[in-house]
Image: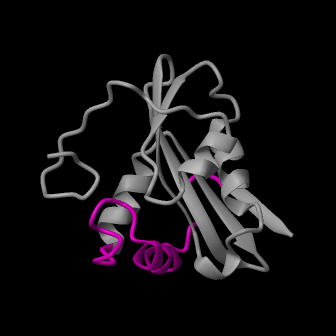
Amino acid sequence: MIEYKTGADGIDWEALGDLYEEVGLVAQFGKKRDVEVIKKAFQNSRRVVTAWKEGKLVGAGRLISDGLCYGTIYDVGVLELYRGQGIGKGIMATLLEGNEHLLIYLTSTFGNEDFYEKLGFKKHKTAYAKYPHESEYLEQ
């Protein structure tokens, strides 16, 4: 059974660092396993969701928002060993709960587009991004 927790209190930051080192999210900070940056990013988010199985952190995600108009979902990740069990869907449902009134944006990682489409997300026709570094996600 998976337990979903909201909020940053009680997070094992080292375990979260391990998660994002494996899945490579939180911009470039996950791959670098920069736990302090990951911690601050999560503490500054409007909603944080973590997924636990038998006391082990197996997934997480976060929502940044003004609470009125817009929200952006970032860093939805699940440890590879636990994928395909509905954990990502549970994280998304918990992030979105109570935020149905917001325009929600997200950027999918390569290969996960179908996952978000099944959750009702559609491609945005005019989305743009500006990164402080090179990225395979940006068109040239």
Along the line of sight, the residue nearer the viewer: 79 or 134:
134
Task: Please say whether residue 21 is one of the residues in the magenta stretch.
Answer: yes
Residue 38 appears at what percent x and percent y? 37, 64
Left/right of residue 29 with respect to residue 55 in the rendered view: left
Along the line of sight, the residue nearer the viewer: 131 or 44:
131
State the residue at coordinates (43%, 76%): 17
**Quick check: can you spot residue 17?**
yes
State the residue at coordinates (26%, 33%): 128
Residue 9 appears at what percent x and percent y? 57, 59
- Residue 87 versus residue 70 in the image, above or below: below
Task: Please say whether residue 44 is one of the residues in the magenta stretch.
Answer: no
Residue 135 appears at what percent x and percent y? 21, 57
State the residue at coordinates (66%, 34%): 120
Residue 14 appears at what percent x and percent y? 46, 80
Q: Magenta region: which residues?
A: 6-34
State the residue at coordinates (68%, 64%): 51
- Residue 18 versus residue 139 in the image, above or below: below
Query: Looking at the image, what colour scheme do you see?
Result: one colour
